[in-house]
Amino acid sequence: MRSLRKSDNAPRFLLLPALALIFFFAACAPVTMPAKKAGIAPPGESKMAMIAPEAPAPAEALMTRDKAEAFAEKEKATAGRPARGQEASGLKAGYADDNKQFNYYVHFLEQYAAQAQHYPINITERIQIKVVDAAGKPVPNAEITVFNNSESLAAGKTYSDGSFFFFPSEYRVDIFRYQATIAHMQQSQKLAIDRQGPREIGVKLGQQRTVPQPLPLDVLFVLDTTGSMGKEIERLKKTIELINLNLASLSSRPQVRFGMVLYKDRGDVYVTRLIPLTSDLDAFQTELNKVQATGGGDIPEDLQSALTDAVQKVGWNRDGIRLAFVITDAPPHLDYGQKYTYVGAAADAKKQGIKIFSVGTGGLNLAGEYVLRQIAQYTSGRYIFLTYGEQGESEGGLPGSVSHHTGDNFQTDKLETIIIQFAKEEINNVLGAGRESDGDYFSATKVGDEAGAETLQKLFEQAVAQLADYSTIAIPEKTAATMLPISPKNATLSVNAEYFSEQLGLSLSRSKTFTMVERKDLQAILEELKLQLTGAISDKDAVKVGKLTGAKMIVAGSLYGNAEYYELFLKLLRVESGEVLSVTKARINKKLGL
C-alpha cells in the first residue's frame, strides 16, 4: 500500500478553533487508506530527559568524534543520495506543521528525548491568543505581555494571523490564572487567562488596524556553509531570482528584502558571516554567488552562533513580516558552553515576531531534527525536510535520507516552491486574501479488490489518529473517551450513519490514545437530556453527555451525502471546557456504504 500524502491542489478547510483536516476518497472507485501510523509513543508518566542550558553535556555525549572520520561519514552520506544530481527536479522537500499536529509533536518530543541531545523547551501546555481589529481582521505586530500579578512571564509580537502562543508549562505549575495586556496603535486592552479554560482566546480591539503600504517582508537565510552543503547552496543560487519574482509580483507588491547569516564551525575560515537585509536583489545575488561549501569536519556545526546573529544583529523591519529559513544538515554544537543557546534565540525571535522555518537537508540525524523542530514550533514556523525520494518515515542519519518523524502528516514540493508558498501565506494572512494554494486533502490509491469494510476500517483508524495527532492539547495515553452515534443530515442517511458509527467505534476501541467509556444506557442519558440518538447534538449538549459518562473527551460526527459520495465530519471535544480540539472530514465513495 502506498503512503498517504496530501494533494497540492484541492480546497483547504479551516474550522476554528481547531484544525480541519480532509481525507478524500476518489468518487470513481473504492480506495484504501493506510492504517494508523506507528512510531509515536504515548507520554505516560516519564519526564523528558533533557540537557539543561546551564550544564551542557560533556563533549563525548554530543557525538563529537575524530574530524576526519566524521567528515568522511558525511561525505559518504552525501554521495549516496538518490536523484540529487537531477537539477531539473529541484530539491524535493516535505514539511510538517507541529503547531497543527500538536499532540503528535508532544509525543515525538517525549519518545526521542533520551536519544537526541538538546536543551529543554517545555511546550506541553499552551494557550493561543488571537487578536483581531474592530472589523474582525487579524492584527499582526500587536504587543502582548503575560503577567502573574506584577511579574512579567512572557512577551512578544503577534504573527501575521494575529496569533501569539503562551506556554504555561514553562512556568510554575501551581499558577492557574494570568493577566495579559494587548497593545497596538495607541490601543491597550487587558485580558484574563484561566489556565483551565479554553486553549484559544480571541481578543477584539476597538479600532481598525492600519497595514503599512507597501507591506515589508524580510526573508533571512541562516545557511550552513560547511563542505556537505554544496548542492543546497547551488540550488539557492539558481532559484533566488525565481523566489524574488514570485513575491515581488504579487498584487499587494510587498517590499521584499533578502539577507543571510552564513555559518560554519570553530576552526573554519569563519564561524558566522552576516549579509544584511537588502531590497537590492543584484547586491544580494552578488553576495550569494560568493558563498562556497567548505570546512566543517565533525558532525555538529555552530548553529547557536548563527542564531545569535540572526536575532540580535539583523536589522529586521518593525511593522511587517519577518521570516527566517535555517538550512542545515547537522545538529548544533552543545558542548561549547555558550550562555546564549538556541533556546534563548527562539525566545527572542518570538518576542520580535520572527518566524523561523527550519530546513533539514543531507543526512540530518535525529538530534538535528529534534532541535530544528523545537526552534520552528516555538516560533510558529514549520519543519521542512528534503525527501530525496525515500518512502515513509526516515529513521534518521541514514545515507540519502533526512530524519523526519512526521507520520503521514506532511506535504511535498520543491524547496523553493515551499519557501514561496509560506511567504505568500504570511502576506495573505495580513491582507485577508485567503490562501494561495488550494491543496490540503489526503488522497489514496486503490489496492487490488480490498473489501469495503476493510477500507472503511483503515479510513476510521486514520481518522481517529488524526483527531488525536492534531489535538490542540496534549492527550495522555488511555484518556477516557466516549462517542456519540454519527447523526445523519436526513432520514435517507440513517442506515449508513449507524454503519459508520459501528466502524468508528471499533477504531476508537483499538486506539492507544483513548479508552472508551462504555455506557449501555446512553439512550437513557440522551432521553434524560431530551436529546435524540439519531439527531444532531450541539457541542454544549455533547459535553453534558460526556460528563454523565465520566469521559474526558468525546467524539461526535455528522453525515451528509450527495449523488457521488458521503461526507463525514468528525470532531474531538474536551469535556472539561467544551472546546473543539480537532476536526476531520472524510469523503467516502458511495460504493463503500450500505
Image: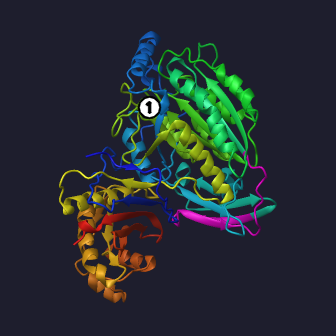
Q: Secondary structure at mark 1?
A: helix
User: How far from the left and from the top, in percent, is residue 36?
Assistant: 29, 52
551 or 448, nearer to the observer: 448
236 or 530, nearer to the observer: 236
User: How far from the left and from the top, in percent, is residue 96?
Assistant: 46, 45
Say whether residue 430 is left or right of residue 393: right
Q: How is the protein colored in the picture?
A: rainbow
- As drawn, 354 above or below 116: below
What residue is shown with label 1? Answer: 367
Say whether residue 499 is left or right of residue 286: left
- Range of residues picked out in magenta: 189-216
- As drawn, 73 above or below 451: above
User: How far from the left and from the top, in percent, is residue 97?
Assistant: 49, 48
187 or 178, nearer to the observer: 187
In terms of image quadrants, where is residue 129?
A: bottom right
Say whether residue 285 is left or right of residue 389: right
In terms of image quadrants, where is residue 132?
A: bottom right
- As drawn, 348 above or below 524: above
Which residue ends up furthest to the right in the rendered image?
186
- As drawn, 315 above or below 445: above
Q: Residue at x 73, y 48 (%)?
A: 253
The quarter of the picture where the C terminus appears is bottom left
Q: Is residue 276 magenta?
A: no
